[in-house]
Amino acid sequence: MKEQNNIAIFGGAFNPPLNSHFSIAQQVLNQYEGIEKVIFVPVNSKYEKQGLIENKHRYQMLKLVTDKNPNFEVSDIDMHQNRSLYTIEVLEQMQKQFPKKQLWFLMGSDNLKELFTWNRAEELISNYKILVMERDDDKIENIIEQNPLLKAHQQNIEKLEQSIRSNYRSSFIREQIKNNKSVRYLLPDEVYEYIIENKLYKCF
């Protein structure tokens, strides 16, 4: 068995977390024996995103699921800040927690296209592994070829093979709930029950 010395960081709004989020995380573990766990890092509610509910709810929904999988964790590292951290800042703080581990940052190909515009982008792609999920009709090879920064550091970019694809986004789920439609089989049961119990997403 390959030595496990890597951790995958999965950032996002998780507003709410979907079955597909956890399926992707499990696929990462299945595909890469060297990755010992996936840490979900929900963004701070101060992040400028429409319809983003309170930190405590998104954190708790993730925790209800991750607590049942020894290879999943959730971190509130961004939620304790007085602003939403840049990705490079999250990774630097996580690296301090795991100084002997190689961190992989999980992102979609839509974000890969914009990575060169991110804060301290070159440090990010130089110091950390980028694990990319292809979305829609994207081809990661083409995205890399068209961007000098990505091309210069392509050895740090890896494509998640056979990644889980879903047409459902969290925004769709929120819209369905607002319109009193059932989303039961699109979410983990724990998340679904938490949303019902706390009457979340009824209006946004």
Image: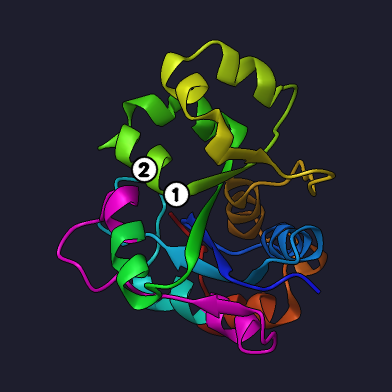
Spatial CA span between label 2 and label 1: 6 Å
| Residue 73 visible in the shown view | yes
The residue carrying mark 1 is 128
The residue carrying mark 2 is 124
Residue 113 in the image: state x and y as whole percent. 51, 24
Binning the other alpha carbons within 10 Å of mark 2 as few (below 14), some (14 to 19) or many (20 upward) gives many
| Residue 14 visible in the shown view | no
Left or right, residue 46 beside residue 23: left
In the rendered structure, which segment of residues is drawn in magenta?
61-90
Identity of the amino acid at label 1? Answer: Tyr
Identity of the amino acid at label 2? Answer: Leu
Decide which of 127, 181 is in the foreground and name it.
Answer: 127
Q: Residue furthest left?
A: 82
* Mark 2 vs 1: CB contact within 8 A: yes
Binning the other alpha carbons within 10 Å of mark 1 as few (below 14), some (14 to 19) or many (20 upward) gives some
Q: Identify the image quadrant of the N terminus.
A: bottom right
Left or right, residue 103 beside residue 189: left
Tag 1 secondary structure: loop
Residue at 69% x, 84% y is 69
Residue at 54% x, 82% y is 63
Q: Is residue 11 above or below residue 119?
A: below
Q: How many marks?
A: 2
Q: Is 71 in the magenta?
A: yes
Q: Is residue 23 above or below residue 157?
A: below
Residue 104 in the image: state x and y as whole percent. 53, 55
